[in-house]
Image (cartoon, rainbow, N blue to C red):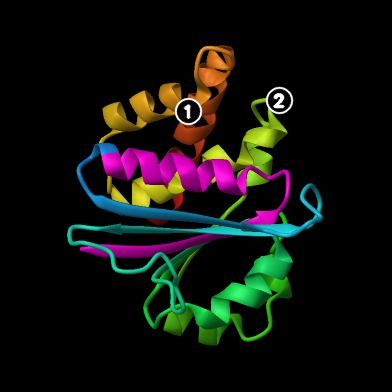
Amino acid sequence: MRIELIISGFGGQGVLFAGNLIALSAMREGYQVTYLPVYGPEMRGGTCNCTVIISENEIASPLISRPSFLIIMNYPSFVKFVPALKKRGTAIINSDLVKPEEIKNLDILKKKYKLYFVPVTSLAESLNTPLLANLCAVGAFYEITKIFNKKIFKKALKEILGNTKAHLFEPNLKAFELGANYIKKNYK
């Protein structure tokens, strides 16, 4: 088993937090893991991405040229990374910022890849926490892959939030559940 994941979006969308959380959860599950954040000088508002590799075997390099999995939070990331996706690779796409009806050749892409259009921004806004769209995407990733146990995920989330952000645990968990439930209801 090996998942090569790229998460990409605007700075401020929690892309790096999501990657770190997935990596820590997978590591606590017993997998070999690498996490590599990439961001430019723009930070908030500019684009950023991170790569996460999860494997049962040792990982030689944290670099990914043809990911098997994508989490796409905005349109520029869709344009940049979907063409690099491995054949039959999987992409979770924020359908609030990447509208399926606006994608040229969507039918061709659907034959080549497994595409999950999830309105992660709207889901987070339904909780009055629009900044938690990233956790909705992590929940969708969890539901599709089941790569880590939910109890392990909760422990990893508490660890990353620490004592200073412990009050954010429940809202983050609710956003995670919304993303997972969206996949259950719409794709299974």
Residue 117 magenta: no
Q: Which tag, 1 or 2, sits closer to the chain's start?
A: 2
Residue at the (67%, 76%) spot, across then down: 79
**Badge 1: few (under 14), some or many (20 or more) residues near its Cα, within 10 Å?**
some
Q: Position of residue 110 (x, y in %)?
A: 48, 78
- Mark identifier at residue 65: none
Left or right of residue 165, residue 27 in this image: left
| x and y percentages locating residue 113 in the rendered image | 44, 77
Magenta range is 1-27
Q: Position of residue 16 (x, y in %)?
A: 58, 47
- Tell which tag, 1 or 2, sits nearer the viewer: 1
Q: Is residue 137 left or right of residue 56?
A: right
- Vertical relation: 26 (above or below) 74: above
* Residue plotted at (39% across, 83% down): 87
Q: Is residue 94 in view from this perspective?
A: no
**Quarter of the view holding residue 47:** bottom right
Return the residue at label 1.
160
Q: Which residue is at a point 50% across and 19% down the rendered structure image?
A: 162
Q: Indicate the amino acid at tag 2.
A: Asn
**Residue under numbered circle 2:** 128
